[in-house]
Image (spheres, rainbow, N blue to C red):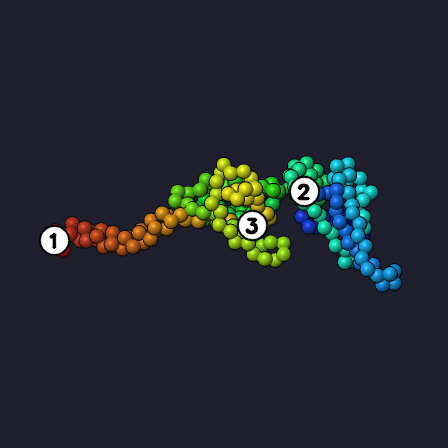
Amino acid sequence: LTTLSNAIKKAGGFTSYSDLSKIEITRDIPIGKGGGKKRAFIDFRSYINKGDDTYDIRLFDGDNIFIPSLKEKDLNILSNSILAGLSPRFIDVSITGLVENPGAVRIPIEGSLSDVMNLAGPRKPLSGKIYILRYNKDGTLLRENIIYSATASPGSRKNPYLVNGDLITVKNSILGRTSGTLKAVTEPFVGIYATKEVIETISGKEF
């Protein structure tokens, strides 16, 4: 049997903005029983707060579950959801680019970009914007450049929350790209000049 809690866990669990008092379930009624749709509202707070499974109802094929959003964040929801086994404790993201310790990083659920930077950082000199690549739950691809600020509040534009599977790259700044280009252009000439100096030293002749 599949229950409401099974479906919520499979979907990744609750967030701090989930309104557990008004979970809406819409179900198709068979033609033999009159047809149409039936709608019910479930208050699921007792499940994560007290372990009361009274409203952990059985689901049927075709059921649609809608969890509305709260206007203000409630941190108790996420912590209780983790304790109830509905939400994971950690998520995994990957970071590359101009950072001291690139690779896979594990952060708490609803962790932000600053958590990743604290674990994988610091950023290397001449680093620029941070690029985030993410597959949304609807299958679309998110590509976003972040002007990161370590002092920005978690969840803000400059320090966004991350989700499991995010790919993060710390890019070169304009100055860093310019320096790299100049180095690539001047290195051959430096090599030619060094070779000229060696030849002159050995032969005693100037070229």
Q: Position of residue 48 (x, y in %)?
A: 74, 39
Q: What residue type is labelled 2?
A: Leu
- Residue marked by disc 2: 70
Q: Which amino acid does label 3 sit on?
A: Asp
Q: Can residue 75 be seen in this view?
A: yes
Q: Where is residue 120 in the image (x, y as percent from the top left)?
A: 50, 42
Disc nearest the viewer among 3 and 1: 3
Q: Which amino acid does label 1 sit on?
A: Lys
Residue found at x 36% / y 47%: 175
Q: Where is residue 5 in the image (x, y as percent from the top left)?
A: 75, 47
Residue found at x 21% / y 52%: 193
Contact between labelled residues 1 and 3, with CB atoms less than 8 Å apart: no
Assess disc 1: are there few (<14), some (14-19) or many (≥20) residues with their C-alpha within 10 Å of its C-alpha.
few
Q: Nearer the viewer, residue 93 or 5?
A: 5
Residue found at x 67% / y 42%: 70
Residue found at x 81% / y 54%: 38
Q: Earlier in the sequence, mark 2 or mark 3?
A: 2
> Is residue 39 left or right of 145 when viewed as pictured?
right
Q: Which of marks 3 and 1 is nearer the N terminus?
A: 3
Q: Which of marks 2 and 1 is nearer the N terminus?
A: 2
Q: In this view, does 185 lie above or below 116?
A: below
- Residue marked by disc 3: 166
Mark-to-mark CA distance, 3 and 1: 61 Å
Q: Identify the image quadrant of the C terminus.
A: bottom left
Instruction: Look at the numbered disc 2 and give the secondary structure of its residue.
Output: loop
Assess disc 2: are there few (<14), some (14-19) or many (≥20) residues with their C-alpha within 10 Å of its C-alpha.
few
Q: Can residue 202 be seen in this view?
A: no
Disc nearest the viewer among 2 and 3: 2
- Residue marked by disc 1: 205
Q: Is residue 120 above or below residue 186?
A: above
